[in-house]
Image (spheres, rainbow, N blue to C red):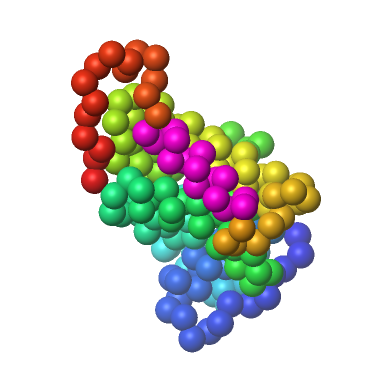
């Protein structure tokens, strides 16, 4: 595996390891990324990586969480969350940024990594997002997660041309509209019921 650029030595050691892991997992598959590669990029001994994180799977989970940080997007009202989610798709457009979607796509084929990804998406994104939504809240949140993942893969991985528009244009408005509709649209089973308050 090709080594990524060395992480800045000014960062605390644990943070250097997490950043190195995020970069390695975003550029190479889970199977092709070893703890020795990550240690070399972080400028530490591989034994220290073992002491800090225990295993590659645990390091992968923490690197994914540190890179994605869905908690930053899921605060405030449902409408403000919708705006934050729409903008997030444009937040990693520079080469220097580590896109959590790259980590996800490159790790899907490994059963251990896929289990970590599934738990992360359900516990750290779908679950918290569902608390902002009316019933069927988990279904709405899962549909939004699937929509964002699909857009992200087509735009940032496959570079489908109509989706390469930059932030602030028609694409962002369409994404925001779809998220908002999914959040608030009345489902078949809800028709005829008294309207409920939107969760804040």
Which residue is rendered at x = 42% and y = 48% of the image?
82
Q: As drawn, is 57 to the left or to the right of 108? A: left
Relative image position of residue 187 (x, y in whole percent): 39, 20
Q: Which of the two residues, 142 or 197, is positioned nearer the viewer here?
A: 197
Q: Which of the two residues, 165 or 7, is positioned nearer the viewer here?
A: 165
Which residue is rendered at x = 37% and y = 59% of the image?
72
Report which quarter residue 133 is drawn in.
Answer: top left
Which residue is rendered at x = 57% and y = 45% of the image?
174
Report which quarter residue 92 is drawn in.
Answer: bottom right
Relative image position of residue 132 (x, y in whole percent): 29, 41
Q: Work out which quarter of the rendered image holds the N terminus and state it.
A: bottom right
Is residue 171 inside the magenta stretch?
A: yes
Residue 78 in sight in this render: yes
Looking at the rendering, the stretch of residues picked out in magenta corresponds to 170-184
89 lies above or below 5:
above
Q: Which of the two residues, 195 or 86, is positioned nearer the viewer here?
A: 195
Relative image position of residue 20 (x, y in whole percent): 57, 68
């Amino acid at each position: 595996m090709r080594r990524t650029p060395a992480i800045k030595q000014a960062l605390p050691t644990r943070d250097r390891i997490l950043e190195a892991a995020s970069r390695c997992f975003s550029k190479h598959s889970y199977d092709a990324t070893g703890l020795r590669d990550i240690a070399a990029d972080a400028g530490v001994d591989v034994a220290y990586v073992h002491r800090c994180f225990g295993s590659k799977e645990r390091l992968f989970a923490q690197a994914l969480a540190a890179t994605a940080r869905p908690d930053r997007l899921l605060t405030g009202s449902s409408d403000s969350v919708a705006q934050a989610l729409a903008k997030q798709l444009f937040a990693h457009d520079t080469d220097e940024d580590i896109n959590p979607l790259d980590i996800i796509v490159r790790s899907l084929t490994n059963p251990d990594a896929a289990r970590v990804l599934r738990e992360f998406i359900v516990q750290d994104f779908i679950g918290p997002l569902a608390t902002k939504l009316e019933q069927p809240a988990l279904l709405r949140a899962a549909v939004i997660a699937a929509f964002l993942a699909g857009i992200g893969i087509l735009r940032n991985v496959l570079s489908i041309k109509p989706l390469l528009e930059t932030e602030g244009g028609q694409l962002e408005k369409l994404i925001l509209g779809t998220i908002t509709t999914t959040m608030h649209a009345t489902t078949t089973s809800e028709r005829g019921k008294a309207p409920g308050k939107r969760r804040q």
